[in-house]
Protein backbone atom coordinates (compact mmCIF):
# COMPACT_ATOMS: atom_id res chain seq x y z
CA UNK A 1 0.00 0.00 0.00
CA UNK A 2 1.55 3.27 -1.08
CA UNK A 3 1.64 6.43 0.97
CA UNK A 4 -1.16 8.11 -0.96
CA UNK A 5 -3.57 5.17 -0.77
CA UNK A 6 -2.89 4.68 2.96
CA UNK A 7 -3.45 8.40 3.54
CA UNK A 8 -6.69 8.31 1.54
CA UNK A 9 -8.01 5.21 3.34
CA UNK A 10 -7.19 6.79 6.70
CA UNK A 11 -8.99 10.04 5.86
CA UNK A 12 -12.04 8.46 4.21
CA UNK A 13 -12.51 5.93 7.00
CA UNK A 14 -12.21 8.69 9.60
CA UNK A 15 -14.79 10.76 7.74
CA UNK A 16 -17.20 7.83 7.49
CA UNK A 17 -16.71 6.92 11.16
CA UNK A 18 -17.37 10.52 12.21
CA UNK A 19 -20.57 10.61 10.16
CA UNK A 20 -21.68 7.23 11.45
CA UNK A 21 -21.03 8.30 15.04
CA UNK A 22 -23.26 11.35 14.60
CA UNK A 23 -25.95 9.20 12.95
CA UNK A 24 -25.79 6.55 15.70
CA UNK A 25 -25.87 9.13 18.50
CA UNK A 26 -28.89 10.89 16.99
CA UNK A 27 -30.70 7.56 16.56
CA UNK A 28 -29.79 6.60 20.13
CA UNK A 29 -31.07 9.93 21.46
CA UNK A 30 -34.35 9.39 19.60
CA UNK A 31 -34.77 5.78 20.79
CA UNK A 32 -37.84 5.03 22.85
CA UNK A 33 -36.24 2.09 24.66
CA UNK A 34 -32.82 0.49 25.05
CA UNK A 35 -33.83 -3.17 25.09
CA UNK A 36 -32.40 -6.07 23.11
CA UNK A 37 -35.63 -6.15 21.08
CA UNK A 38 -35.26 -2.47 20.18
CA UNK A 39 -31.63 -3.07 19.15
CA UNK A 40 -32.66 -6.05 17.00
CA UNK A 41 -35.46 -4.04 15.40
CA UNK A 42 -33.03 -1.22 14.64
CA UNK A 43 -30.64 -3.66 12.97
CA UNK A 44 -33.47 -5.28 11.02
CA UNK A 45 -33.70 -2.14 8.88
CA UNK A 46 -31.39 -2.70 5.89
CA UNK A 47 -30.01 0.85 5.96
CA UNK A 48 -28.95 0.52 9.60
CA UNK A 49 -27.40 -2.90 9.09
CA UNK A 50 -25.44 -1.75 6.04
CA UNK A 51 -24.21 1.42 7.76
CA UNK A 52 -23.07 -0.62 10.78
CA UNK A 53 -21.24 -3.18 8.61
CA UNK A 54 -19.55 -0.33 6.73
CA UNK A 55 -18.60 1.32 10.02
CA UNK A 56 -17.01 -1.93 11.20
CA UNK A 57 -15.09 -2.24 7.93
CA UNK A 58 -14.00 1.41 8.13
CA UNK A 59 -12.87 0.93 11.73
CA UNK A 60 -10.82 -2.15 10.85
CA UNK A 61 -9.22 -0.43 7.85
CA UNK A 62 -8.51 2.68 9.90
CA UNK A 63 -6.91 0.61 12.66
CA UNK A 64 -4.85 -1.39 10.16
CA UNK A 65 -3.46 1.65 8.35
CA UNK A 66 -2.73 3.50 11.59
CA UNK A 67 -1.16 0.52 13.32
CA UNK A 68 0.83 -0.44 10.23
CA UNK A 69 2.19 3.08 9.87
CA UNK A 70 3.22 3.23 13.53
CA UNK A 71 4.96 -0.14 13.32
CA UNK A 72 6.71 0.72 10.04
CA UNK A 73 7.92 4.04 11.44
CA UNK A 74 9.00 2.98 14.93
CA UNK A 75 9.88 -0.74 14.89
CA UNK A 76 13.18 -1.05 13.06
CA UNK A 77 14.28 -4.71 13.37
CA UNK A 78 12.67 -6.43 10.38
CA UNK A 79 11.87 -9.69 12.17
CA UNK A 80 10.14 -7.93 15.06
CA UNK A 81 8.25 -5.70 12.64
CA UNK A 82 6.96 -8.72 10.69
CA UNK A 83 5.88 -10.45 13.89
CA UNK A 84 4.10 -7.36 15.17
CA UNK A 85 2.38 -6.72 11.83
CA UNK A 86 1.23 -10.35 11.79
CA UNK A 87 -0.14 -10.04 15.32
CA UNK A 88 -1.93 -6.81 14.40
CA UNK A 89 -3.42 -8.35 11.25
CA UNK A 90 -4.54 -11.45 13.15
CA UNK A 91 -6.06 -9.39 15.93
CA UNK A 92 -7.97 -7.18 13.48
CA UNK A 93 -9.12 -10.19 11.45
CA UNK A 94 -10.29 -11.94 14.61
CA UNK A 95 -12.07 -8.79 15.77
CA UNK A 96 -13.82 -8.48 12.42
CA UNK A 97 -14.96 -12.10 12.49
CA UNK A 98 -16.12 -11.73 16.09
CA UNK A 99 -18.06 -8.56 15.23
CA UNK A 100 -19.65 -10.27 12.24
CA UNK A 101 -20.70 -13.27 14.32
CA UNK A 102 -22.24 -11.03 16.99
CA UNK A 103 -24.05 -8.89 14.44
CA UNK A 104 -25.42 -11.91 12.58
CA UNK A 105 -26.64 -13.38 15.86
CA UNK A 106 -28.38 -10.14 16.85
CA UNK A 107 -29.96 -9.69 13.44
Image: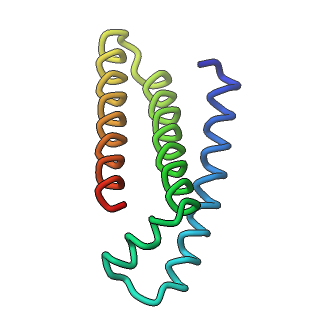
Q: Quadrant of the C terminus?
A: bottom left
Say which residue appears at 37% left-offset and 41% top-offset. Answer: 96
Residue 15 lies left or right of residue 25; in this view the side is right
In the displayed structure, 12 sits above or below 35; it is above
- Residue at the location (66% across, 52% down)? 15
Task: Return the residue nearer the eye: 35 or 18.
Answer: 35
- Indicate the position of residue 35 as horizontal and vertical percent values: 32, 81
Look at the picture and state if 26 lies above or below 105.
below
**Placement of 35 over or under 85, stated as above or below:** below
Depth check, front residue: 24 or 49: 49
- 69 vs 76, nearest the viewer: 69
Residue 76 placement (x, y as % from top left)? 41, 15
Report x, y in % for residue 2. 64, 18
Q: Residue at x 30, y 48 (%)?
A: 101
Point 51% across, 28% down: residue:
69
Snapshot colouring: rainbow
**Which quadrant of the figure has residue 43?**
bottom left
Nearest the viewer among 41 and 68 is: 41
- The quarter of the rendered structure image containing the N terminus is top right
Which residue is farthest bottom? Answer: 32
Q: How many marks?
A: 0
Q: Is residue 16 left or right of residue 52?
A: right
- Looking at the rendering, which quadrant does residue 40 occupy? bottom left
Toward the top, the furthest residue is 78
Q: Give the percent coordinates (x, y) of residue 29.
A: 53, 84
| The image quarter in which residue 58 lies | top right
Amino acid sequence: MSGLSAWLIQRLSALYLAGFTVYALVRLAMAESFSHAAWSDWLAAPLNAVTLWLAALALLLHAWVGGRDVLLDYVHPLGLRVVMLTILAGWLLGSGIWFGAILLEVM
